Image (spheres, coloured by chain):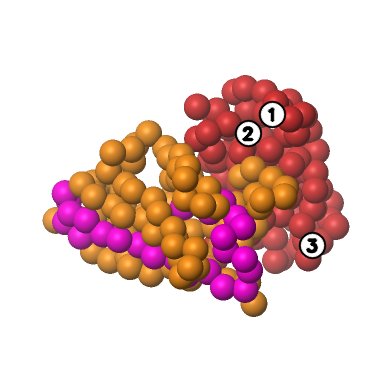
Chain colours: A orange, B red
Amino acid sequence: EVQLVESGGGLVQPGGSLRLSCAASGFTFSSYWMSWVRQAPGKGLEWVANIKQDGSETYSVDSVKGRFTFSRDNAENSLYLQMNSLRVEDTAVYYCARDDCSSTNCHWGAFDIWGQGTMVTVSS
Amino acid sequence: DVVLTQSPLSLPVTLGQPASISCRSSQSLVYSDGNTYLNWFQQRPGQSPRRLIYEVSNRDSGVPDRFSGSGSDTDFTLKISRVEAEDVGVYFCMQGTQWPYTFGQGTKLEIK
């Protein structure tokens, strides 16, 4: 079964750090771009960042640049989001999603597989 | 950044009736390769988003054929020919033509 499972969410104080993980299974993880998307409570979806198949390129939204770091371990079929200098406005459910862009064909932004999400709460 | 504006934001619909959601972009979504990376997602209450349509009009497998997408350049539409109870949720358009990817605000569909 094709699946993405996030973990690592929790409660953290403003200025703190947290590392999210996303475990992939059921597909060739190393063949796909991967993204993080977040959703603040009761709000819409916001794309956060994506990372190329080999990890050599990442792109992110301006609000997280310099604070969040994106990486992947293809040997472990895992995606990571290191969040530093967290702010109250980073409070959200964080989803990992497979960008439907493989080494042979790209449908940019067409996230075809989503995880169940992990909640990050930034509060004092 | 590309701004996607959805309308309406709230959509009460009678069962069996059609529904239509508009998504307008602040810039052309035609990419340099000639493709238009405008996608539609459905988020049912308490669930993760699910892709319905990619590249304007390509319906995902398993998505009922009552869902259809159309449009071009900056103006796009998601249509449901006959709304069913399972269609309740929030619908988002999203562009992948230009980084950062951006989503519309979402349209909440409810049964009247």
Residue with the most extreme left position: A124
Calculate the distance from the C-alpha at mark 1 to the C-alpha at mark 3: 25 Å
Task: Categorize mark 2 by other alpha carbons within 10 Å: few (<14), some (14-19), many (20+).
Answer: many
Query: Magenta stretch?
Result: A12-37
Q: For the point 73% across and 34% down, which residue is it?
A: B36
- Classify B109 as above or below A29: above
Residue at 80% in and 44% down: B57
Tag 3: residue type? Ser
Give yes or no for contact between labels 2 and 1 (Cβ–Cβ under 8 Å).
yes
Vertical relation: B36 (above or below) A82: above
Give the amino acid type for the residue marked by disc 1 in the picture: Tyr
Q: Which mark is residue B61?
A: 3
Please name the residue shown 47% across and 50% down the image: A55
Task: Say left or right for B64 vs A42.
Answer: right
Give the camera-side residue of B106 and B34. Answer: B34
Mark closest to the chain's N terminus, 2 or 3: 3
Apparent side of residue B69 relative to residue B4 in the rendered image (left or right) = right
> Is label 2 on the same chain as label 1?
yes
Q: Callout 1 environment at 10 Å: few (<14), some (14 to 19), or many (20+)? A: some
Select label 2 or label 3 by which is in front.
2
* Near-viewer residue (A27 or B41): A27
Q: Residues within 10 Å of mark 3 (few under 14, many from 20)?
A: few
Q: Chain of mark 2?
A: B
Give the percent coordinates (x, y) of residue A36: 46, 52
Question: What percent of the width, then of the height, locates residue A23?
Answer: 47, 70
Q: Are marks 1 and 3 on the same chain?
A: yes
In the rendered view of the protein, which quadrant contains the N terminus of chain A? bottom right
User: Which element carries disc 3, helix, strand or loop?
Assistant: loop
Vertical relation: B28 (above or below) B91: above
- Residue wearing tag 2: B97
Residue located beneath label 1 in the image: B31
Spot occupied by residue A97 in the image (x, y as percentages of width and height): 54, 57
